[in-house]
Structures are given as C-alpha cells and as structure tokens.
Image (cartoon, helix red, strand yellow):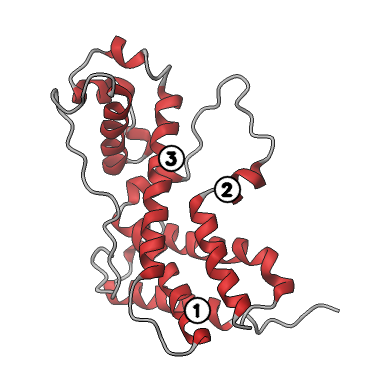
Amino acid sequence: MANLGLVLHYEAVATTHVGRAGYHHGDLPNALADAATDLARGGGPEAVVLREAARRVGVSAAAAYRHYVGHGELLQAVKHRALAALADAMQAGLDSGQPLAGRADDAVRRFRNLGLAYVGFALDNPGLFHTAFCRPDAGPGDVDVNVTARIEASRPYQILSRSLDELVEVGLLDPARRPVAPIAFWASVHGLATLLVDGPLAALAEREQAAAIQRTLDILIDGIGSAPRRT
C-alpha cells in the first residue's frame, strides 16, 4: 500500500511493456488493450485513447479501428482488466497471512485483510481504480437491463460474498442481514478509498491515513453482528 507502511502491500498489476514487436500476428486486440491499460494506469479512464494505444503498439490507427470500433469499446476492455486486477488483489489479501486457530477469529482476520487489500489497490493503482468503476459510452443495444445480475457476477463481488458467507458460517453475521451486507461493506471501503485517493483524506499524513483505514475496518467488523434488529 503506497506510502502507508501498512502490513499488506499488493502490486496487483505488473507494468505492461508494449512496442512494435510487442504482439504476435493475430493478437493485436490484446496488444492494444495492454497499451491502453498502461495509459489507464498512468492517467485513469480519460487517458485511454485508441490512437495513442495504436501508436504505442506501433500500428496505424486504421489497423486499431478494425478491432475496436471506438473509444468506448477499448475503454470497456480496459475496465474489465482493471476489475480483474482489483479482484486479484482482493483474493491475495483474503489468502494472505497465517490462519488463526479459531474459525471465527480467522474469518474476521480474512475479512479485515480483504478490506485492506481493496483500499490498498486503490492507493497503489489510482488510475486503474478509477477505470474499474468508470462508465464507458454505451453503444446501440448496450443498455444493461439487469444491473444487479451483472454486479453479482463480477469477481470482486463474488470474493466479497464468499468472505461474508464465512462470517455467517461461524455465527458472526446474522443470516437475515446477509443480503444487504455486500452493499454496506462495499460502500464503506470504496468510499474510504475514494476519500483517500481523491478527497480530503488524501491530505492526511501517512500515519493518519493508516489509522483511518484501520478504524473504518474496526467499525465495520464491530458492527457485523451487533446492530439491533428491527421489530
């Protein structure tokens, strides 16, 4: 986690080097997506430009347009890669460290590491973090009629869901609260990450940022099973 001195550090996406010899015949779409991912890493979704990706690969813009109709289509490909990188970081966080003897304690440890990994990815890769959640221009017929199903099918959501299921299994999360738990957790860590990357919390000293992350996760974990039920 960049400049925070926290225990977990996930450099989830290796830098992609793409040049004139950077792709094999028939693999130009991937080479363009690699170059565009590098652009996003450095400048977020606004930096993804098809002509610049083509220039970096060493092909003409006309050749690039044969594979990506326009900016929106290329950005969609990069968005998928950024989400995959976030999911990899989350999974690495979930699997890191030594298991604790008690199942409940270990489920909490893994859940905390998941949150640390999410925020750590945003701090280490702000360009990709922004790109993962951007909204590329939709083309004709591209309207998403089932947003919920699309979100639930995403790897980040599935990784979070498995961690929450662990908390249910060990008796720490009320099954009645399980359906809304992903939204509450995701909103909290995503909001914190955004405040640390782009908002007023970016101005905090490193130690203060680290403390803010830990305190937020403490509150989330303390509230997993403690909220009163409505009657």
Q: Are marks 1 and 3 in contact (CB under 8 Å)?
A: no
Of mark 1 and mark 2, the one earlier in the sequence is 1
Which residue lies at the image location 44% right of the left edge and 57% below the top edge?
194
Residue indicated by mark 3: 80
| Residue 203 appears in the picture as rendered | yes
User: Dot 3, how many residues are within 10 Å of its Cα: few (below 14), some (14-19), or many (20+)?
Assistant: some
Determine whether 28 is above or below 127 in the image. above
The kind of residue on which mark 2 rests is Ala
Disc on res. 61: none
Residue 16 location (% of width, % of height):
21, 40
For mark 2, give the secondary structure: loop
Location of residue 186 by image quarter:
bottom right
Residue drawn at x 63%, y 67% is 181
Disc 1 to disc 2, C-alpha distance? 23 Å
Question: Closest to the observer: 181 or 191?
Answer: 181
Q: Residue at x 33, y 77 (%)?
A: 97
Q: Nearer the viewer, mark 1 or mark 3?
A: 1
The residue furthest right is 231
Name which residue type carries label 3: His
Q: Residue at x 46, y 64 (%)?
A: 192
Along the line of sight, the residue nearer the viewer: 161 or 15: 161
Q: Tag on residue 153?
A: 2
Other-residue count near label 1 (Cα within 10 Å), few / some / many at <14 / 14–19 / ≥20: many
In x, y percent, where is residue 6? 29, 74
Which residue is tagged 1? 107
Quadrant where the N terminus sits is bottom left
Residue 129 percent location from the top left of the image: 39, 49
Task: Tell me the amino acid under the disc marked 1.
Answer: Ala
Specify whether residue 198 is in view. Answer: no
Disc 3 from disc 2: Cα separation:
13 Å
Question: Which of the 4 quarters of the picture holds residue 139?
Answer: top right
